[in-house]
């Protein structure tokens, strides 16, 4: 039995900014070797990016979320500092309640850690790394990007894990975040930091039972470090090049090296070896060695070359650096127990089919919206593609208070009534549009449901479906 | 059942009066309603009160109705506060009519009040979203402007209608409101003003939206016996039609119609024994311009898709065949949520007694149309001048 990676999925936020744009704003850019990077939209975070990448991986692997026995989520930027977030991802995907979950958050090492655990699990497993670190806008922020990658792990895989190695020594201050802070930082003791990373990466590589890897995704907080660290090993520069993505996505925390791994595996042949080595700050390092190439994977290069470039002022708004996020006047309150009742509708568009007339009702509660009978609904999952029946744009001043912080960050948004068809029956759902120019959405447009952050109530982020134009 | 008559009706000025309270505003409306009664009238004869309010601002969420009737000296009478969003006092009116028709009461005070402009901008936005469907519709990011804008987008897509047609509602209603000393926005506007105004929620501009308003209104509903005693020209309540509908727009069959209006109107016409649109004037719920267009069609004043033609041809102008919103409507007169339904009754009362600020010639029968939220609750009342012979 050859257990390993069977498919991968990727999510890179649509917004990108060039380091030169940041450099123009500050007079200097602290993004060495980074040409451009991705930034999450105002309604994206580690959870939404994880769900998107996971769906991509499941689709490519032709796998069913309900069969997953393990789901690991790695992120250094969990929307809540303490709380298991993987169960949210499992619920959003429609996974089974007996799936083992782990949420790993301490450092970028979490990405390779959950991947190794997924390989160690039994049955179909999912390892997701999704991250969007933030830092001091004057310096650390310049290189910090965002992205997500999910690996589907199963038996009879084209890519197998052949070895893993770790290294541990005390190297504090290289990459850290103070308790209660949202800013990733480094002390900036240059030689000390380079030695910490270089020694750790070299030690792991020398322990890995692999010769002349064709691809290598090495710890990459900037464009230069993977080559500098790789110089202490016998890995070829071209191999490091194949596993380096930081130059186009930025330092995406726990997701950077897994994204590089995905890029390298997608271009690897069946007899190629590929390594991934990350450094966790503090002195921990972990390396995984794989054999084989992965066809069921998106082109990371393609994902990193697209996107929509933004100006620096738009960047500051979108990231929330200049918006306090306070909901003035109070927001709409839906209690958490009520919200939880509605999760299947919010995540998977589960509607009710009336036993009397066959008509569809959304949400699947109460009397039938068509014939008004009160029978027990049959629950059906709507297709995720629908058609806009009515749409408007909510401009400045028009948003309810709970959407004001999002609007301050992301600007006006479109809100539509979207019609979904299932087995010849139609039902409509009110949906906010995302990832689009709101002015371009018109009646009759095709849209697809995607899961984004809706709002936060009583400090708890709430997620649900929004729509994006197809 | 017995007949019910309006023997008096009055409103406070509608506008921005942050120094007033819901009680002081209602006191003004009440005094004006008392003053409008023809005969020598002892207010102690009022048996009961039904008062509508949404309660914007949360100033007296519980028991604001009794707080009002105690304030105006109606000590001890049973008072019911009615909440059906913007149709609160349309339903208060209906309750008052029911009480008289059933014989439970001979003289009932119906009314409504709302104070909206003493609240912070953020608080106001919060309150303007409380009557939409909360768990799905509001959490897609809309308040009412957004929901009505969605209807407008669907209407413009489905029919031969343009944003200028929406603006025609504003031009007409402002022209009427400019003659009404009680109007909140008593100025005229041009088609260009209305169309070029800043967008609130595309395709609705600022002039396609009613203001937030402070105000109160009151009507005295009496049995025939009391009406004969106290009124020279009473106004008969020929019908009180009402219907509920799904609170969320997405839960309805049509995005270009308010089904509850269709049903409430059918019930009202049936009660009054008249054909659809067989009235001399109408006060319709034009909270947003698109709402007036849909009201024409839902009330049966014209066929589907014909509302723009009525506006373009001036049919609903004061000198047209069927004047609509001679008071200025919600657009110009203002929309103090809980006061709007009985505010429309005030206009119908004055029109049928020949005292309209913009008087419709020979007005014998009129209707009022009051919508809660985007269509979750609707009342349609039909009023006729004088004593009727029939028994509905």
Image (tube, rainbow, N blue to C red):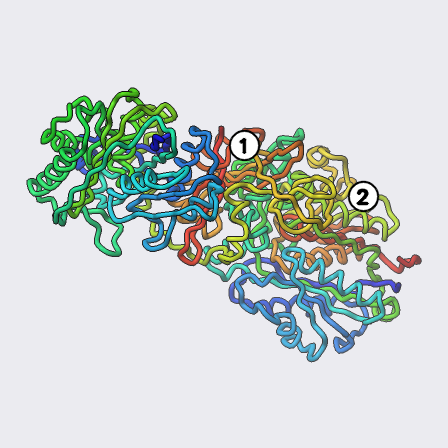
Could you tell me which secondary element the residue under label 1 belongs to?
strand
Q: Position of residue A406 (x, y in %)?
A: 41, 46
Of all residues, the one furthest to the bottom in this rendering is B76
Using the image, determine if residue B40 lies above or below residue B215: below
What secondary structure is found at the residue carrying circle 2?
loop
Tell me the subunit letter for badge 2.
B
State which quadrant residue B195 falls in: top right
Between residues A327 and B91, which one lies in front from this camera angle?
Answer: A327
Q: Vertically, is A166 above or below B352? A: above
In this picture, residue B2 sits left or right of residue A347: right
Please tell me if label 2 and label 1 are on a single chain.
no
In front of the other: label 2 or label 1? 1
Q: Which residue is mark 2?
A: B277
- Between the C-alphas of marks 2 and 1, the distance is 42 Å
> In this rendering, is residue A130 above or below B222?
above
**Which residue occupies 56% across, 61% down?**
B56
Q: Nearer the viewer, residue B324 or A55?
A: A55
Residue B152 position in % (x across, y down): 61, 38
Residue A17 visible in rendering = no
- From the viewer's perspective, tell me whether residue A134 is left or right of residue B108: left
**Is B229 on the left or on the right of A388, as rendered?**
right
Decide which of A135, B372 is in the foreground and name it. Answer: A135
Q: Quadrant of residue A358?
A: top right
Residue farthest toward the left in the current orientation of the protein: A191
Q: Front-most of B189 and A454?
A: A454
Position of residue A275 measured from the top left corner of the image (x, y, whole percent): 22, 30
Q: Which quadrant holds the N terminus of chain B? A: bottom right
Q: Measured from the top left, where is residue A114 in percent x and y? A: 31, 42
**On what subunit does the disc labeled 1 rest?**
A
**Which residue is identified by label 1?**
A385
Q: Residue furthest front?
A: A1
């Amino acid at each position: 039995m050859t257990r390993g990676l069977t498919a991968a999925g990727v999510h890179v936020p649509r917004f990108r900014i060039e380091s030169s744009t940041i450099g123009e704003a500050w007079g200097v850019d602290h993004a060495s070797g980074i040409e451009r990077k991705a930034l999450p939209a105002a309604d994206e975070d580690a959870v939404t990016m994880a769900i998107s990448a996971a769906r991509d991986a499941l689709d490519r692997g032709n796998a069913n979320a309900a069969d997953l026995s393990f789901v690991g989520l790695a992120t250094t930027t969990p929307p809540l500092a303490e709380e298991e977030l993987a169960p949210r991802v499992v619920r959003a995907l429609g996974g089974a309640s007996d799936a083992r979950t782990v949420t790993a958050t301490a450092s970028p090492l979490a990405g390779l850690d959950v991947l190794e655990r997924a390989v160690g699990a039994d049955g179909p497993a999912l390892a997701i790394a999704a991250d969007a670190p933030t830092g001091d806008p004057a310096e650390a922020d310049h290189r910090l990007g965002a992205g997500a990658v999910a690996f589907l792990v199963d038996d009879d895989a084209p890519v197998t894990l052949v070895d893993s190695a770790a290294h541990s020594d005390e190297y504090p201050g290289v990459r850290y975040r103070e308790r209660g802070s949202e800013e990733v930082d480094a002390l900036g003791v240059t030689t000390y930091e380079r030695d910490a990373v270089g020694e750790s990466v070299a030690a792991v590589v020398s322990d890995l039972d692999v010769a002349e890897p064709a691809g290598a995704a090495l710890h990459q907080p900037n464009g230069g470090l993977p080559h500098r660290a790789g110089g202490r090993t016998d890995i070829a520069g071209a191999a490091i090049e194949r596993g380096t993505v930081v130059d186009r996505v930025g330092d995406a925390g726990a997701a950077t090296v897994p994204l590089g791994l995905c890029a390298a595996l997608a271009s690897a042949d069946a007899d190629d070896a590929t390594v991934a080595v990350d450094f966790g700050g503090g002195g921990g390092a972990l390396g995984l060695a794989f054999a084989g190439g992965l066809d069921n994977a998106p082109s990371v290069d393609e994902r990193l070359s697209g996107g929509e470039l933004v100006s620096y002022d738009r960047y500051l708004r979108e990231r929330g650096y200049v918006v306090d996020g306070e909901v003035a006047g109070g927001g709409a309150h839906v209690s958490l127990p009520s919200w939880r009742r509605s999760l299947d509708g919010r995540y998977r568009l589960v509607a009710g089919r009336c036993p009397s007339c066959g008509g569809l009702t959304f949400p699947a509660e109460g009397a039938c919206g068509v014939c008004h009978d009160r029978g027990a609904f049959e629950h059906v999952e709507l297709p995720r593609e629908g058609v806009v029946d009515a749409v408007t744009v909510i401009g400045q001043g028009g948003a309810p208070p709970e959407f004001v912080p999002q609007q301050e960050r992301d600007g006006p948004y479109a809100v539509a009534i979207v019609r979904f068809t299932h087995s010849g029956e139609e039902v409509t759902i009110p949906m906010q549009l995302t990832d689009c120019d709101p002015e371009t959405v018109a009646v009759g447009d095709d849209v697809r449901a995607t899961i984004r952050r809706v709002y936060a109530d009583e400090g708890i982020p709430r997620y649900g479906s929004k729509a994006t134009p197809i | 059942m017995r007949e019910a008559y309006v023997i008096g009706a009055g409103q406070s000025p509608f506008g921005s009066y942050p120094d007033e309270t819901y009680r002081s505003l209602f006191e003004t409306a009440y005094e004006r309603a008392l003053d409008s009664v023809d005969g020598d009238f002892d207010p102690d004869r009022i048996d009961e009160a039904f008062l509508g309010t949404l309660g914007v601002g949360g100033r007296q969420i519980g028991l604001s109705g009794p707080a009002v009737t105690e304030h105006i000296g109606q000590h001890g009478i049973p008072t019911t506060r009615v909440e059906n969003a913007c149709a609160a006092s349309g339903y208060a009116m209906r309750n008052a009519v029911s009480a008289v028709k059933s014989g439970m009461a001979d003289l009932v005070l119906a009314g409504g009040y709302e104070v909206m402009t003493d609240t912070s901008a953020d608080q106001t936005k919060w309150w303007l979203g409380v009557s939409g469907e909360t768990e799905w519709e509001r959490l897609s990011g809309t308040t009412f402007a957004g929901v009505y804008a969605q209807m407008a987008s669907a209407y413009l897509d489905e029919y031969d209608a343009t944003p200028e047609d929406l603006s025609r509602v504003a031009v007409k209603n402002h022209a009427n409101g400019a003659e009404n000393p009680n109007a909140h926005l008593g100025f005229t506007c041009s088609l260009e003003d209305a169309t070029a105004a800043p967008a609130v929620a595309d395709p609705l501009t600022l002039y396609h939206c009613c203001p937030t308003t402070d105000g109160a209104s009151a009507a005295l509903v009496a049995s025939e016996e009391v009406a004969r005693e106290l009124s020279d020209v009473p106004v008969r309540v020929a019908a009180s039609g009402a219907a509920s509908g799904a609170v969320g727009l997405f839960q309805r069959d049509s995005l270009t119609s308010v089904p509850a209006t269709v049903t409430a109107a059918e019930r009202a016409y049936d009660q009054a024994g008249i054909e659809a649109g067989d009235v001399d004037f109408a006060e319709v719920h034009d909270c947003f311009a698109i709402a007036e267009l849909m009201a024409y069609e839902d009330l049966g004043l014209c066929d589907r898709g014909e509302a723009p033609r009525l506006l373009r041809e001036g049919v609903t102008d004061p000198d047209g065949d069927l004047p609509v919103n001679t008071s200025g409507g919600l657009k110009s007169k203002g929309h103090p949520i809980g006061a709007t339904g009985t505010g429309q009754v005030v206009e119908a009362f004055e029109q049928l007694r020949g005292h309209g600020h913009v008087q419709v010639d020979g007005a014998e029968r009129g209707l009022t149309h009051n919508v809660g939220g985007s269509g979750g609750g609707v009342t349609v009342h039909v009023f006729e001048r004088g004593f009727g012979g029939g028994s509905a």
